[in-house]
Amino acid sequence: MSAAYRFTPFELPPETVALRAEVRAFVQEEAKQWNGWQIGHSWTGFDRELSRKLGERGWIGMTWPKQYGGHERSALERYVVLEELLAAGAPVGAHWVADRQSGPLIMRLGTEAQKAKYLPAICRGEAAFCIGLSEPDAGSDLASLRSKAERVDGGWLLNGRKVWTTYAQDCDVMIGLFRTGFSEEHGKHKGLSQFLIDLKTPGIEINPIKDLTGESHFNEIVFDNVMLAEDALMGVENGGWAQANAELAFERSGPDRYLSSFPLLPLALAKLGESVDDPSIARDIGAMVAELTVLRQMSLSIQNQLENGETPLQEAAITKLLGTGLEQRMPGLIADIVEAQPLRRAGDTLSEALAYLIQVEPSFSLRGGTNEIMKMIIARGMGL
């Protein structure tokens, strides 16, 4: 049996209070121009100008060394910034992936040249990253992917397809996982490598995929004899499986895995007024707040482990599984509580936010790994 799961609770230190007030004031001013539909997008909303403003304030790459454009602030200060942005439904998608996982991966495994090229641009809010993992024929079994990167004179030749890649049509760089080797002796997990890919490279075709809302967040990316330089390799050749899994711990444990629907809650409370006479409504709101409180403690605990150089894959899987479950329930619960109609152009912030979130919430348990994959990781952590 594996060691017990570790979720050590702790509170944010008092010195983060002033930062929270600063971020909240900034966000409240910016939010004056957002309608409910935009707020519903939360961290998947793509706004390069807002990302640049956040970069100017030092709120991207906050924990990174100053030599790479960072600000050498604490992980807990960064967490406060994330909470305030997510609570307001700020459209931070233009830098979110880069700040959350691509930048930390480059910081940990990149060459000095890669760090100097990419990290300062991320900190300025000028470099948008996407992740190339899923493939049309691989499903949730990433280790069965077939897109290849072959060594050739002068570098690497890429062929294959990626799918469900968020905002690839608007991004600058992809960190893609490709097959660089395979042997029955070592298994399919050992022959994968990651690459830093400029999405303007010849041979890359990006095909947006329209979703239920009529928007195109996802994409299919086709690689047709795409030539990359030798230094495009990210980390260790054939070590991409472990690298990608470590990266996913950042993706699955953050506050974005339980706060995507959160902006609905303060909007609903404002609509209900100061007092709630119906005990069932008070109970439902209390249950949501209780779940959010527990998930926040779990997420903060994982953040502490990541900062200590640990890789809490199982803990992140539990947090992601429970967090996205709450995110999926919240739009329906809040619509019932306030008896609001989800309408895109209602002129009412809550109705417009509901209109978006009710359509997209089924996807919340897919992004970052399906529930089935999360349960498998959890079972392995329990020694089953």
Image (cartoon, rainbow, N blue to C red):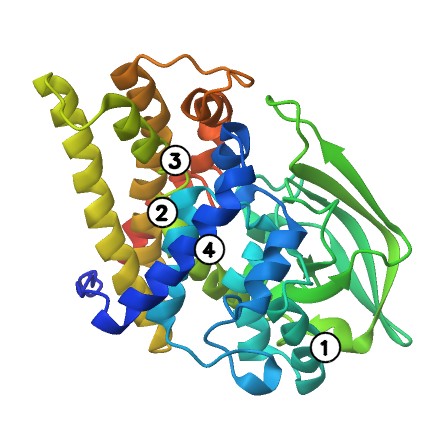
Query: Residue 364, position in %: x, y?
Result: 45, 36
The residue that mark 3 highlights is 261
Residue beneath label 1, please?
A: 117
The mark found on residue 320 in the picture is 2
Dot 1 or dot 2: first in sequence order is 1
| Label pair 1/2, CB-CB below 8 angstroms | no
**Mark 1 and mark 2: span between their CA atoms?**
32 Å
- The mark nearer the N terminus, 3 or 4, is 4
Q: Which mark is residue 104?
A: none
Q: Is residue 154 left or right of residue 43?
A: right
| Residue assigned mark 4 | 26
Q: Amino acid at mark 4?
A: Phe
| Closer-to-camera residue (43/252) | 43
Of the two numbered discs 2 and 3 in the rendering, the one whose residue sits closer to the viewer = 3
Which of the two labelled residues, at mark 3 and mark 1, occupies the earlier sequence position? 1
Using the image as rendered, state which of residue 168 and residue 243 is in the foreground. 168
Disc 3 versus disc 4: distance between alpha carbons? 21 Å
Total marks placed: 4
> Crowding at label 1, few (<14), some or many (≥20) Cα neighbours within 10 Å?
few
Q: Secondary structure at mark 4?
A: helix
Nearer the observer: mark 3 or 4; the answer is: 4
* Mark with earlier residue (4, 1): 4
Q: In the picture, which quadrant includes the N terminus?
A: bottom left
Crowding near the residue tagged with mark 4, few <14, some 14–19, many ≥20 C-alpha atoms within 10 Å: some
Residue drawn at point x = 44 percent, y = 20 percent:
351
Q: CA distance from mark 3 to mark 1?
A: 35 Å
**Residue 132 seen anywhere in this rendered image of the structure:** no
Q: Is residue 355 left or right of residue 318?
A: right
